[in-house]
Image (spheres, grey):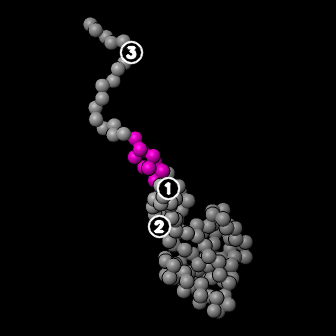
Amino acid sequence: MREEHDVPLSKFTTLKLGGLAQRMVHVENESELTTVVSEADARGEKVLVLGGGSNLVVGDSGFDGVVVKIATDQITAETKAGKVHVLVGAGASWDAFVARAVGEAASRHFREFPDRSAPRRCKTSAPTDKR
């Protein structure tokens, strides 16, 4: 867990807009998240939970509370009932998520093809040059 003060929120939003966060705490797991939010709540401090910042617009006046930046960026995939479920940490980038999801789908799709590594004879109707 790391704490900073007067952090420009424009660095954390897709649109690159936003004033300063009075206080920003970077958390790396659920336990840290729970602790920071509980402590802020006990002090009556405003809380803004920030993931990747793609759905956030912050005014030039910034945020006068604690911004909790979630730095959990793990992406895991598991198969349940024949379907692939991709679990994404709130701090993961969209591009990383898409790459993993596409990779999982491709991997699953191509597993259904027969083994093509053995050499095969090919028939061709192309003319051959017999000199």
Few, some or many residues within 10 Å of mark 3 (<14, 14–19, 20+)? few
Amino acid beneath label 2: Gln
Residue that badge 1 annotates? 83
- Between disc 1 and disc 2, the foreground one is 1
Q: Nearer the viewer, residue 66 or 101?
A: 101
Answer left or right for 33 relative to 19.
left
In the image, residue 9 above or below residue 4: above
Work out whether mark 1 precedes mark 2 in sequence or the reverse, and give the earlier one.
Answer: 2
- Between disc 2 and disc 3, the foreground one is 3
Looking at this rendering, what residue extends furthest in the front direction? Answer: 81
Whether residues under marks 2 and 3 lie with C-beta atoms below 8 angstroms apart, the answer is no
In the image, is residue 64 part of the stretch drawn in magenta?
no
Amino acid beneath label 3: Ser
Q: Which contiguous range is marked in magenta?
A: 103-113
Work out whether mark 2 precedes mark 3 in sequence or the reverse, and give the earlier one.
Answer: 2
Residue 117 visible in the picture: yes
Residue that badge 3 annotates? 125
Residue that badge 2 annotates? 74
In the image, is residue 107 part of the stretch drawn in magenta?
yes
